[in-house]
Image: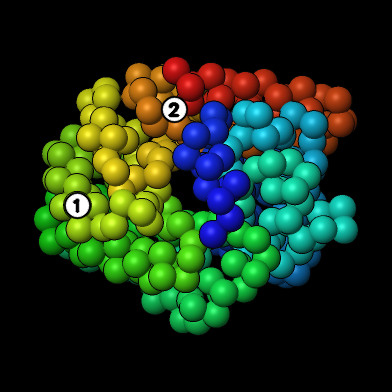
Amino acid sequence: MNSDQFNKAQHGAGFIAALDQSGGSTPKALKLYGIAEDAYSGDEEMFNLVHEMRTRIITSPSFDGDRILGAILFEDTMDRQIEGRDTADYLWNVKQIVPFLKVDKGLAEEKDGAQVMKPIPGLDDLLARARDKGVFGTKMRSVIKLPGSGLDEVVAQQFEVGKQILAAGLVPIIEPEVDIKAADKADIETTLKQGLIERLDALDASTPVILKLTLPEVDGFFRELVDHPAVLKVVALSGGYSRDEANARLARNPGVIASFSRALTEGLSAQQGDAEFNQALDATIESIYRASIA
């Protein structure tokens, strides 16, 4: 594990940019960016276009290591280059931004009010390849919609896979997302926090994890998680909230930083000139940064 990256992840200011839209969510991301589905055909053209979008964001002078702590990449992005360097290498050695990799293969069908992750075949090989490319950590997402046995299964799976990632020398971002539309969201968060604390208490504090959680209904609700010795950072997903709403909720939760995806790219367009694009991105990054250090 890179000690400089660990130090930045632990003590650096700023937030984690989520640039990890994958096969299912890429068309939506491109559409929001002003590229309609009829502008390309097939996965190869689609991923070429989304890499151009990500390259434009990452190489922008607004995308800087002073305000951005880390960036989460999709596997296809990790395997590509930016200005002649592997993406993870460019992020760390040019921008001083800690690189992470999305490793899950999407969600299983809903069962017992939750969606666990689909199986991740070849995970050990992927982790070894990521480590060789200079990636610091990983991200994997599940979704919880109701309290109960599905929630318990999500937490168990997240930590089971998390231990496999820790054993490979990487830091897992554990992401049991709570659906913001859940009728009993606050109750789910209470049960989830208890389950997380029980699992964290069993971890070795010398190999901490990062938690990525939905912004809570009760302000300051994640304080025990922020202070837990086995937690490197608590980050928040925007989860479908608008950027303004997400920033407002984030600012009311000291110690929690952003890891926004759609809220990060909101307002960016392929049709913008570089000056307009960089200005829009700078304003977005500044607003998320301010909410993250509040």
Which residue: 60% across, 46% down?
A: 4
Three-letter code for the amino acid on which mark 1 is drawn: Asp
Residue occupied by mark 2: 246
**Res. 260 visible in picture:** no
Mark 1 crowdedness (10 Å alpha carbons): few <14, some 14-19, many ≥20: few
Q: Quadrant of the C terminus?
A: top left
Image height check: is 184 above or below 50? above
**Res. 232 visible in picture:** yes
Q: Secondary structure at mark 2?
A: helix
Image height check: is 164 above or below 282? below
Which residue: 40% across, 44% down?
A: 232
In the displayed structure image, the side of residue 21 where residue 172 appears, left or right: left
Residue 74, picture quadrant: bottom right
Mark 2 crowdedness (10 Å alpha carbons): few <14, some 14-19, many ≥20: many
Residue 69, picture quadrant: top right
Residue 18 point in image, percent of width and height: 56, 45
* First reached walking from the N terminus: tag 2 or tag 1: 1
Q: How is the image coloured?
A: rainbow
In the displayed structure image, the side of residue 237 where residue 16 appears, left or right: right
Which residue: 36% across, 23% down?
A: 254
Q: Quadrant of the N terminus?
A: bottom right
Three-letter code for the amino acid on which mark 2 is drawn: Ala
Residue 25 point in image, percent of width and height: 56, 55
Measured Cα–Cα span from mark 2 to mark 1: 29 Å
Residue 201: assigned label = 1
Which residue: 26% across, 30% down?
A: 223
Choose between 112 and 274: the one closer to the eye. 274
